[in-house]
Image (tube, coloured by chain):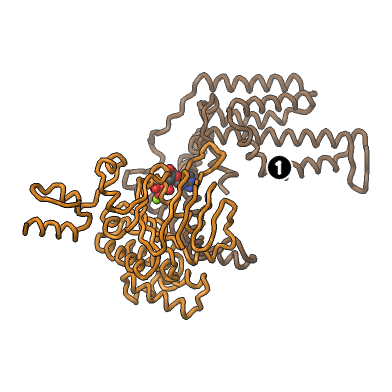
Chain colours: A orange, B brown
Amino acid sequence: MSIKFEDVSYIYSPDTPLEKKGLDNVSFELQEGSFNAIIGHTGSGKSTLMQHFNALIRPTSGKIEIAGTTITPETTNKNLKELRRHVSLVFQFPEAQLFENTVIDDIAFGPKNFGYDNEKAFASARFWLKKVGLPEEIGKRSPFELSGGQMRRVAIAGVMAYEPEILCLDEPAAGLDPEAREQMMALFSEYQKEGHTVILVTHNMDDVANYAENVLVMEHGKMIKQATPREIFKDRNWLQEHHLEEPKPSLFATKLQNYHFAKLPLTIADLVKDIETNLKG
Amino acid sequence: MSKILIGRYVAGDSIIYRMDPRGKLLATIIFILFVFLANNPVSYLIVTIFSIAAVAATKLKPKVFWDGVKPLIWLILFTSFLQLFFSVGGTVYWQWTIFALSSYGITNAIYIFIRFTVIILISTVMTVTTKPLEIADAIEWLLKPLKIIHVPVDKIALIMSIALRFVPTLFDETLKIMNAQRSRGADFNNGGLVTRAKAITPLLVPLFINSLETAIDLSTAMESRGYRGDQGRTKFRILKWSNVDLINLCYFILLLGLLLIFRTH
Ligand SMILES: Nc1ncnc2c1ncn2[C@@H]1O[C@H](COP(=O)(O)OP(=O)(O)O)[C@@H](O)[C@H]1O
Ligand SMILES: [Mg+2]
């Protein structure tokens, strides 16, 4: 089953002088089990779009089909548990959502809400605490004693612990150190390979090139392009026009003189391979 | 939540927006006092026309003002209702135990209704056309004389501005945390009282921690920039009287004159 957006528009504070278009006639389809990236400038509507996936906000007009649920402007916050069990969202700066006495209780909060019994909830919590790269002892500590990076991992574990089929991540790695970022990205990629759908908002084009198979580009609330990373990063002029960066390997390749590239390398692995070919050839 | 007291500012562009907040605050207070001078149909008509003129001068949609009156409509109706059935005097049309409908009651009910409504309308004119921080500045100015009796006016003003500044932030934060917990299966809409009270912990704890952190950050930032309270501070937003404010206050003198002429002595 795919995820389908049909002419979805969202207006903030409608009928007031502060009225603002958050989304403007967005239509697309995402494949089940795919890794999708959403890119675009600050204020382009990425977070607004993300909150539609599990109906935290409902479209002002249009229709969304996701995980067997149809979301329309008439949908209300009631009876959405089933949807939210299947489609979950990690907010930007999710460390703000921690509240329990201990880390492990906090991670188990989601699973318990979605009907796991106590034993299963805590087993899952312990499993995901390890998965996000934190030692077991941290589970007994208060989440408020942790460093920012550790809190981020706990928050991410808290959402993955009930294993949603569709995992939506809004800039999950913003502000993390490069090593933590790699670990988190690897975790999401592994999760997708196990058969889940991942939707990731990011400003990091290397992450897009490395992991995504499908990219949505947002601008002023509109979706201006949907394509593979290769397609997106092919057109340098188009990227510049829309103030989007390129992956570092392609920039690096452009700077190498007297080298021949059949197509611009997007990832470090591609770059290394191409350089090797050039040196041998 | 924040709608009732503060943060009701609506962006717009009309002469009222360009007035000095001190002038507007004074005018609002004067108007509220003057309303109590009205005591007959003509004088009530005058205050009504006056407040409608002020509403019209904002050039905002009527809905903005209806939103101002709406939260208080039951209070207004209830008070008018009390006047209607519990005042005695004039011709009595109907009576049953302690309830009585008299001509005196009817006029009183109408007067109370008008009095309430125009006061709310004028305060709304003030709050929708003046940014909360400007209102705080105006209140600070108004309280200045109290410095003589050692009331810490600057500190009160600072507390007021900070509180005002963070109301929208807190509101956004609340919404964000609510959504984050909803995402994790929290349910704020269903269940009985106990369930709902329990459901609120995942909202309140992060909100509290967040506010404390913001407060600590803010005080650190203020201290590291050398903030030390009252003595010799200059103002970032400098308030300026202009002719518009003068003319505005003249209108209110006109109102006073009219009321004094037309009220029943
Ligand atoms: N709660 C809100 N109220 C009003 N406008 C908002 C709100 N949240 C976002 N917006 C506006 O909607 C637009 C899209 O915002 P957002 O989806 O957060 O962008 P992004 O995540 O791409 O930075 C922006 O112009 C923003 O100012
Ligand atoms: Mg965002």
Q: Position of residue B199 (x, y in %)?
A: 55, 65
* Residue at image coords 54%, 26%: B14
Which residue is tagged 1? B73
Residue at point 38%, 36% (across, down): B233
Q: What element carries label 1?
A: helix
Q: Is residue B156 left or right of residue A211?
A: right
Q: In which quarter of the image is the C terminus of chain B?
A: top right
| Closest to the observer, B98 or B199 | B199
Pick the residue in front: A261 or B153.
A261
Q: At x 36% / y 43%, what residue is drawn? A: B227
Q: Quadrant of residue B117?
A: top right
Q: In the image, is the residue at mark 1 within 8 Å of ligand 1 by its beta carbon? A: no
- Residue A84 lies, with reference to residue A51, above or below; the image says below
Depicted A241 relative to depicted A273: above or below = above
Coordinates of residue B256 in the picture (x, y in percent): 68, 22
Tag 1: Cα neighbours inside 10 Å, few (<14), some, or many (≥20)?
Answer: some
User: What residue occupies the far left of the structure in this picture?
Assistant: A280
